[in-house]
Amino acid sequence: MIRLIFSDMDGTLLDENGNLPAEFGAMYARLKERGIRFAPASGRQYASLVQTFAPWRDEMIFVAENGTMVMEGGRELFSSPVERSLALEIMRMGERLAGVQSVFCGKRQGYLHSADDAPAFRAELSKYVSQAAVVGDFAAVDDVPIKMSFCDFSGHAETTILPAMQVFRDRLQVSLSSTEWVDLYNFGVNKGSAAQQIQQRLGVTPDECAAFGDYGNDLELMGAVTHSFAMDNAIPEIKERARYLAPSNLENGVMAVCERILAGEFD
């Protein structure tokens, strides 16, 4: 019997406008009644996830920032800080990339450089980071770094950001999180490793877990559960790794599979 569901957000649970399915609240109530917990697992900031799931903020486990920050009931379960001097070195590299915006992701909030504080970037950033401050120098940030993120609006992050950041691949993970975003964070930290730690804490086995994903930062999550679902709109690597295929996010695929879970199809 499935007791815990992990779900990515963008391109997975959310629609093309970044909204939850209209029936999510009713579905969540049915899952909760059956003793099935729901854990959003995203590259998004914890504050952003709490904003999206405000009615259930004290009930869910939040796997935020690609697994570098895991929270429950407003309490940190675990996190993975990046060594500060290395984080600042990476931010300086990002500032040298033409047409690229940088975000220093701390435990408390995100930080963007004053040079990047433009309405267009603010709009893009607000999808993932709901609490952000503007700074003139990342070295002045008084927060614990857990992730460094870089955005290319052109949708070519794989060629404009990723190659430059590979210089750090011997010290940190360098992850292409979407066509626009590249994230750097500690080795061994990802949605999958976070899911495994949560399983251990709750006494839940991989056979009792389901997970949904669509992009590269969901690869390890697909391997952490028995019932792994690639969205129909997922990249080929996710479809190869996952055990099952779900309808696309535009077809409310997560909700459709949750109906099957409640029907006992995967017991």
Image (cartoon, rainbow, N blue to C red):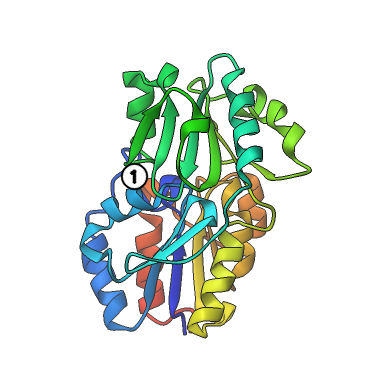
Q: Quadrant of residue 164?
A: top right
Let me know if residue 114 appears in the view: yes
Residue 59 spot, x, y in % from top left: 30, 71
Q: Residue at x 38, y 75 (%)?
A: 37
Indicate the quadrant where residue 72 lies: bottom left
User: Which residue is more in the foreground, 9 or 262?
Assistant: 9
* Residue 242 visible in rendering: no
* 238 sits left or right of 262 in the view: right
Left or right for 29, reference 87 = left
Q: Residue at x 44, y 70 (%)?
A: 5
Q: Point out residue 57 in the picture as x, y percentages from the top left corner.
A: 28, 63
**Which three-letter amino acid code belongs to the residue tagged 1?**
Asp
Residue in the image at 31% along x and 38% along y: 17
- What is the total number of numbered labels drawn onto the structure image? 1
Residue 30 to residue 112: above or below = below
The foreground one among 220 and 77 is: 77
Instruction: Give SS at disc 1.
Output: loop
Give residue 32's quadrant in the image.
bottom left
**Looking at the picture, does residue 202 appear above or below residue 147?**
below
Q: Is 236 drawn above or below residue 164 in the view shown?
A: below
* Residue 184 in the image, given as x and y percentages of width and height: 62, 41
CA neighbours of label 1 inside 10 A, class few (<14), some (14 to 19), many (20+): some
Q: Residue furthest right?
A: 170
Q: Which residue is mark 1?
A: 15
| Residue 216 percent coordinates (x, y) | 61, 46
Q: Residue at x 31, y 75 (%)?
A: 31
Please give left or right for residue 180 compared with residue 84 in the image. left
Taking depth in this image into account, of 204 and 2 the one nearest to the observer is 204
